[in-house]
Image (spheres, grey):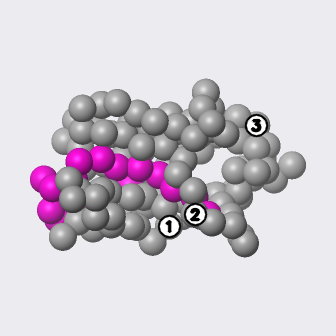
Amino acid sequence: QVRLEESGGGSVQSGGSLTLSCVASGGIFSVSSMGWYRQAPGERRELVARIYNGGSTHYATSVEGRFTISRDNTKTTLYLKMNNLKPEDTAVYYCNARDSGFEDTWGRGTLVTVST
């Protein structure tokens, strides 16, 4: 079974940058794509970005052009580079791994707080 652990969250001022990391261990051979989701207080969890094993990526409209998702060559570490952060980006960010059967595994989340 895949295990995911996020790091890199923190507090930053509007316009600043952060990079989140997610280390995957366990059955990573079964993973077909990985992604970042976020959940703000009182809101639903939403997709931020996803990257597929072939390298293609998909971004939420709200972060396109500001955030970049990537994986290392071993596909064991997932990154989310976040630039020009806005207060509305404040949320708990979750790492996600999806297998070929569309079964999801989640990390515990890391908090990102953007102040004005």
Viewer-side label of 2, 1 = 2
Element at badge 2?
loop
* Residue 48 appears left or right of 107: right
Q: Which mark sits nearer the N-terminus, 3 or 1?
A: 3
* Residue 112 appears left or right of 109: right
Pointer 2 local density, CA inside 10 Å: few below 14, some 14–19, many at least 20: some
Residue 115 image position (x, y, % from top left): 81, 53
At a point 57% along the width and 41% down the height, the residue shown is 60
Q: Is residue 63 above or below residue 101?
A: above
Pointer 1 local density, CA inside 10 Å: few below 14, some 14–19, many at least 20: many
Numbered label attached to residue 79: none
At a point 61% along the width and 27% down the height, the residue shown is 65
Q: Main secondary structure of the magenta part?
A: strand
Residue 63 image position (x, y, % from top left): 63, 38
Residue 2 visible here: yes
Q: Farthest residue toward the top?
A: 65
Residue labelled with disc 2: 45
At a point 17% along the width and 65% down the height, the residue shown is 26
Element at badge 1?
loop
Q: CA distance from mark 2 to mark 3?
A: 23 Å
Residue labelled with disc 3: 15
Q: Is residue 30 above or below residue 51?
A: below
Residue labelled with disc 1: 109
Q: Which residues are magenta?
A: 22-39
Q: Amino acid at mark 3?
A: Gly
Look at the image and say whether residue 28 sits in the magenta stretch.
yes
Q: CA distance from mark 3 to mark 1?
A: 22 Å
Residue 21 image position (x, y, % from top left): 43, 51
Q: Amino acid at mark 1?
A: Gly
